[in-house]
Structure formats: C-alpha cells, structure tokens
Amino acid sequence: MRFSAPLVPGRLVRRYKRFLADCRLDSGEEVTAHVANSGSMLGLATPGSRVYLSRSADPKRKLAWSWELVEAGGALVGINTGLPNRIVAEAIADGRIPALAGYQTLRREVAYGLRSRVDLLLEGEGRPPCYVEVKSVTLSRRAGLAEFPDAVTARGAKHLSELAAMAGAGARAVLVYLVQRGDCSAFGIAADIDPVYAAAALAARAAGVETLVVHADLTPGGIEIRADF
C-alpha cells in the first residue's frame, strides 16, 4: 500500500481525547491531526516523538491532517488502524500471502455472526469460504517481540468467538495479526493486559481458527507486507 503523497514529518506535542494529536511540523507549523486508533498506543505517544502525517485535500474533512507513523525505539510503527485491512487485502490480491492464495474473489466488510462484519471474505470454487479478521499489532515491551492487544478489547474477543463459530460451521476462519513495527520478529498475546482475550484466542485455536502473523515494512512512502514474513 502506497500513501497518495509522501508523508510530512514533525514532532508529537501531545495526544489527547484519543483521536486528536497536536504536532509540530518540521516547517515550524503546529497542526492538529486525526488519530485513527482507539487503542492505548502504549509506548507510542510520547511527546517529542518523531511522527509522520498525511494531508487530505477533501474540503469536507474537519481535520486535514492524519497521523500515520511514529518512530519508537529507532523503528517506524504504523498507528492508523484504518489501513491494515487494505494492506492485507492488497497483499492477498498480489499473491504475497501464500496461506491465503488461490481464491477467486475477495470482499470486504461482509455481514456475518451476531451483527458483525468480517474484515475480508475470500471465496473460490470448490473451497469453503474463508473468513479473515485483521488485527493491527503495534505494542512492543521487549526487544524484538510484538504483542496484541495493547488494551482490553471486548470487541476483539467477540471476533474470535465468531470466527470459531464459522470454523465450527465448516468454513475456514483466519485471524491475521499484522505487525506494523520494523523492529520485531516475534509475536505473542499480551495475556497480562487482557486475560479474557488471551483465553478467547486459545479457545478459538482449539475450535479450528487459524492464526497467521505477517510483518510489514514501513517507510514514509508506504506500508508493504514483507515477502519473507
């Protein structure tokens, strides 16, 4: 996935009200950016951090700027949770996720379960449908280890139970963890942060839900899934 234009660098002044961040661009201009991330962003919202913003030309938007990347521990981290579905969908279409290759169609936000919408639905002749949920992974508390979640997520646990129900009904169900950090090569569930989610992950795996961890390369020009994840 390529950004429509190169991102604009700056420094974080503060993140507040979860969805807002004041940033000082390298030009000296101070702007307020939208933060498309409802999580805690643990370790990623330190004032003074190097950030990269995109700017929209849409006059209807309340805020023209969006926070996309942050430098943490010397590596870039993708914090916009509105992008992972697109990143994974593009990678599947390009054949860069072999475990999800061979399907003829890919649809997004398809209704399923109990008033939910699955992130991606893959379908192909002679194969059961494949329900794919995508989770963005940005937390790292130990060198080289990425973890999910970074906060309690009842919604995430609900998705796991719904994927388990799809697997029980004969469909294929896959949970894709997209590691959006350039400094991590391993992954684990942060059970101390959300033990309910950790238990749901174990139950889902026992019910036949597949877990796939993919890593991304991040630059101010775009975010692409690594070929050797």
Image: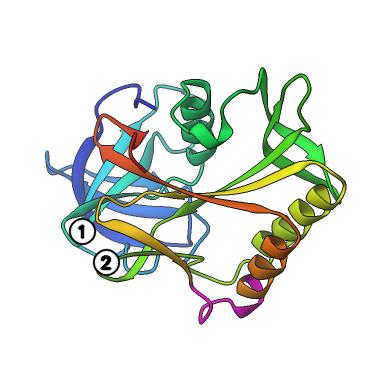
Pinpoint residue 145: horizontal percent, then vertical percent: 33, 66
Q: Quadrant of residue 66?
A: top left
* Dominant secondary-structure state across the stretch colored magenta: loop
| Residue name at image x 71 percent, y 55 percent | 159
Q: Give residue 46's mark.
A: 2
Q: Are marks 1 and 2 in contact (CB under 8 Å)?
A: yes
Amino acid carrying label 1: it is: Ser
- Please state, as top left, top right, bottom left or bottom right, where the N terminus lies in the image: top left
Residue 200 left/right relative to 142: right
Amino acid carrying label 2: it is: Thr
Look at the image and say whether residue 1 sits in the magenta stretch: no
Q: Is residue 186 above or below residue 170?
A: below
Q: Is residue 32 above or below residue 47?
A: above
| Residue name at image x 31 percent, y 56 percent | 185
What's drawn in magenta, residue-wise? 190-197
What whole-number distance in Å separates the C-alpha atoms at marks 1 and 2? 6 Å
Which residue in the protein does label 1 denote? 49
Pinpoint residue 115: horizontal percent, then vertical percent: 84, 48
Pinpoint residue 16: horizontal percent, then vertical percent: 41, 63
